[in-house]
Amino acid sequence: MKTSNKNSELQNKIADITEKLHKVNEKLKESEAFKGHFISNITNEIINPFASILGLSQNILSLKDGDIEKAKSMANLIYSEAFNLDFQLNNIFAAAKIEAGEIIPEILNVDIHKLIQNSIKIFKFQADKKKLLIEFNYKISADLNKIYYFKTDPEKLKLILSNIISNSIKYSNESGKLQVNTWIEDGNLKIAIRDYGKGIDAAGKKVIFDRFKQLDTNINTINSGYGLGLSITKALIDIIDGNIKIISEEGKGAEFIITIPEAKSSTEDIASDANEIYFEDNEIF
């Protein structure tokens, strides 16, 4: 009887180990598939903007004296391509660090109003092209001269906001609006980004943050759909112990609501903004 029980226990353990090995093997297959697809996608995401920038720059150099309007028009296109390339590279670098398990929170005292304001500002060019009005409702303090500091990771928070704002602009209707609301609830930072565009159907909401589920769809490019940018967003939110939810109906727009708990840190270092480099309209080279 004892031998029979031991054999049964051993068989159960073997079955359990086999099941775990099977799951690990499936994850490895998914990871390899993702890497291959990732490399294929980012090749186009990097090469295409570079080709446009080089071509437009060459055209500007060949302009005749006095063609200032043509030069301005092409300079705007160069700016747009350079901005997109810079933004995509930030996502690519973040994805590489996440995949390698080399990304950790870097907590600072963050000026929330300025960080969100700057996150919106860097997309002004893209919003203006669609004639979009972006409303920023800051409900933490009525006195904007009084800085409210919140302990979190500014670089990760800014990339989170950038990906959602970029997505919301892309799927907004021409001459529409986008709302960014910020408040504190139960000690948590809440940021809601609302657009009034095409919305997300039930199937889309199930896979929108899942990079593996999106491998066989057409929404897996960095900024040309929901894909990698939003999967990175979800990973970064998890790293800073936050959460995100979506309220959306197809044809009625979408609202992304982010909840970030304040980090338990004794840091006294202050950040008015993240240290990411984005091209500004008035930057002089």
Image (cartoon, helix red, strand yellow):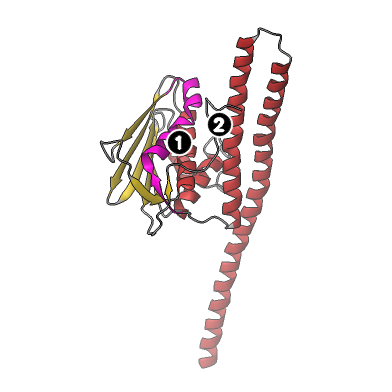
Cα separation between marks 1 and 2: 12 Å
Q: Which mark is residue 167?
A: none
Please say whether residue 186 is one of the residues in the magenta stretch.
Answer: no
Q: In the rendering, at what x and y percent does residue 259 appear? A: 36, 48
Q: Residue at x 65, y 9 (%)?
A: 67
- The mark total stands at 2
Say which quarter of the image contains residue 225.
Answer: top right
> Horizontal placement of 215 versus 247: left or right?
right
Q: Which residues are magenta?
A: 107-132
Whether residue 111 sits left or right of residue 56 in the image: it is: left
Could you tell me what secondary structure mostly forms the magenta stretch? helix
Q: Callout 1, which amino acid?
A: Ser
Which numbered disc covers residue 119?
A: 1
Horizontal and vertical percent for residue 107?
A: 44, 54
Residue hosting label 2? 279
Closer to the camera in the image, 270 or 169 = 270
Q: Nearer the viewer, residue 57 or 22?
A: 57
Residue type at tag 2 = Phe
Q: Is residue 109 above or below residue 204?
A: below
Q: Secondary structure at mark 2?
A: loop
**One can see residue 198 in this view:** yes
Packing grade of label 1 (10 A; few <14, some 14-19, many >=20) is many
